[in-house]
Image (cartoon, rainbow, N blue to C red):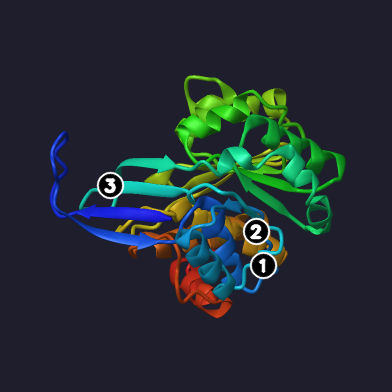
Amino acid sequence: MDDLYFCHNNIIGATSNPAVRQRSVGGVMSNIARHLGMLSLDVELITMIGNDSDAQMIQQVLTADKVKLSHIIHADVPTGCYASVLAPGGSLFVAAVADDCESMITPHKLEERKAVLLEAALIVTDTNMSVDTLQWLITFSRSNNKKLIIEPVSVPKAKKLAALDLQGVYMITPNEDELAVILDVNAASQAENLLAEKTGIDHIWLRKGKAGSVMMMLSEEMISLEAAEVMVEDSTGAGDAALAGWIKAFADGKDAKQCMRYGHTMAYEVLQQKGAVLQTLTADLLQQSIKKYYDHVQ
């Protein structure tokens, strides 16, 4: 569950700041899965939740958004919670997460669900699990010729990837700070030269905020896409929405530049609202939004 606090004024540290609270179903993979379900993709979410009222709400919301939950895992612990404090312009000031569930997603739990992973055209994960579980999923995907996408989530969680054998991973989606810790370098600007040498990852989709994004690929030229100027209401979930948009375009057979445009468009729409999920999203509405931002470019 996401608890978001939108402060009325500039945030002052070490004291109470007046704010409006918004509570909703959240989580990186939940946000991505819900958008994909709304866009009519066949999506199955493997996750772990508690046996509390929050878990019941999560299941209801995901099911309503056409996300399949046949392989969900239950644990006798509280469902995870993410709390964030946002400045008046919608930028994140600080956030915290408490989630006992993520440590219980083990290689054994995924091994039990191997059949559904083998059926997948694309496997997407975040880093909210142990290093051992992430490595199991990477090795499984490589061994079975499955395209695997990893969303690093945050700088502390992206550090897990620095210790892993990432050979054969199809794509990672870091921002500049996350990429620096993944590659164990001082700056993301060094990433392009290290792409093949250090990681063996096919694609790195580097998110650069207001500067747009860059797609670096092993065997092709780098692609850059500038960001449009939008009024930011809330930055929560923009990266999740971008990846959902990219996956939709990829599933529809679009080229690399078009996939990035779909991703940017989804991010723009989420940035202009409160909350991480576009509640009224459909494939038709996404097409209309893409035309709004990119109809004038080749």
Residue bearing the label numbered 2: 45
Q: Residues within 10 Å of mark 2 (few under 14, many from 20)?
A: some
Q: Amino acid at mark 2?
A: Leu
Q: Earlier in the sequence, mark 3 or mark 2?
A: 2
Q: CA distance from mark 3 to mark 1?
A: 31 Å
Q: Residue furthest front?
A: 76
Report whether 91 appears left or right of 264. left
Q: Amino acid at mark 3?
A: Val
Q: Amino acid at mark 1?
A: Lys
Front-most of 281 and 21? 21
Dot 1 lies on which element?
loop
Residue 77, given in percent of the width and then of the height, sits at 52, 47
Report whether 272 appears left or right of 254. left
Residue bearing the label numbered 1: 68
Front-most of 52 and 116? 52
Residue 187, given in percent of the width and then of the height, sits at 47, 24
Residue bearing the label numbered 3: 85
Q: Is residue 86 above or below residue 264?
A: above
